[in-house]
Image: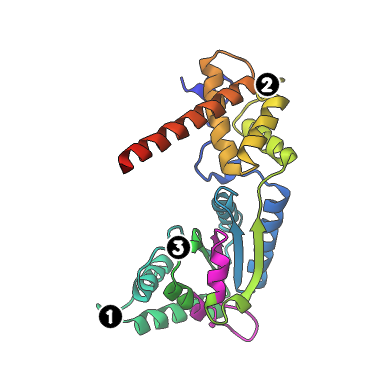
Amino acid sequence: MSYFAIIGLNKEPFSTSPDPNFFYESSEHRAALMRLVIEVRLKRGLSVVLGDVGTGKTTLSRKLFQMLKERDDIIFHMILDPTFDTEEIFLDSLVRTFGIEIASPHPTVLDYKEAIKRYLFEQGAEKNKTVVLLIDEAQKLNSLSLEALRMLLNYETNEFKLLQLVILGQMELLPRLTEVRNLIDRVSLLYTLTPFGIDETREMIEFRIRQAGYNGREKLFSEAAIMEIFKYTEGYPRRIGMLCHKALKLLVMKNKLIVDNEIIKELIEHEANLRWQKTNLLLKNSY
């Protein structure tokens, strides 16, 4: 029997996988989602969501996909790892992502661009579809790929952009966008995600536990434990989830009924010891 079943859960509540069903909508995440949907529906072109590591960008992207994929008038594409060395490789990836067939056995960069242009005009102008391309981890895009994206944003009718581009990346992406001529000027939405406050940390923990099937009267995490979690994680959703996952496993191992302050402190002390051991090992190996 899995550890979460022992404490009355149907699923793992704090998995690191970006399951949209476990996406806790903080006020910021809800605002970001609604604004992204509006930008896509209005066909404004380029939307950018920034945030430090662990602020929930990837899970946000999956939630957006879940919200839009059921619509018949929206074609949703995603690129999860945009690491491409050359413009040709990037364009080839886009062609394959869009499902475009190219007759030439050895297509050139121009062939790729023309094929993508035809696809966007066919879907957007002729079939009245909204083509969405979401790129996660966009800080990995090099200048050639960013320039190619700027080119794609040139494709438009008199009324709207033919490609709705949503890119999510870490904070270092912003200055790189400004380096590509006229790209930053095309940003219709720029939104930055920040860590949770104490109330949202508590709500996220309780939401995920209930979403995992817990229906007990007593809370699984004490208020003191939640305060300790918030202080240690600084409100970053990914860190909160990882610490809570370990806390529930330790709860079962200790045969306790509630995650209290002592469990969290024990985990934090254990993490500190691991870091100390790794640091010492690195120092030894450097000699």
Is residue 121 left or right of 264 when viewed as pictured?
left
Specify the amino acid type for callout 1: Ser
Alpha carbon distance from label 2 to label 1 = 62 Å
Say which mark, if any, is on residue 104. 1
Compare marks 3 and 1 and give the one earlier in the sequence.
1
Dividing the picture into quarters, in which one does residue 101 lie? bottom left
Residue projecting furthest to the bottom = 158
Mark 3 or 1, which is nearer the eye? 3
Residue 260 at x, y = what percent?
A: 65, 21
Specify the amino acid type for callout 2: Gly
The crowding category of the residue bearing disc 2, from other C-alpha atoms within 10 Å (few below 14, some 14 to 19, many at least 20), is few
Q: Is 142 included in the stretch rendered in magenta?
A: no
Which secondary structure, mark 3?
helix
Is residue 38 left or right of 264 when viewed as pictured?
right
Alpha carbon distance from label 2 to label 3 = 44 Å
Is 276 in front, or is 74?
A: 276
Q: Which residue is mark 2?
A: 216
- Residue stretch in magenta: 149-178
Residue 259 at x, y = what percent?
A: 63, 22
Q: Which residue is mark 3?
A: 140
Is 187 in front, or is 264?
A: 264
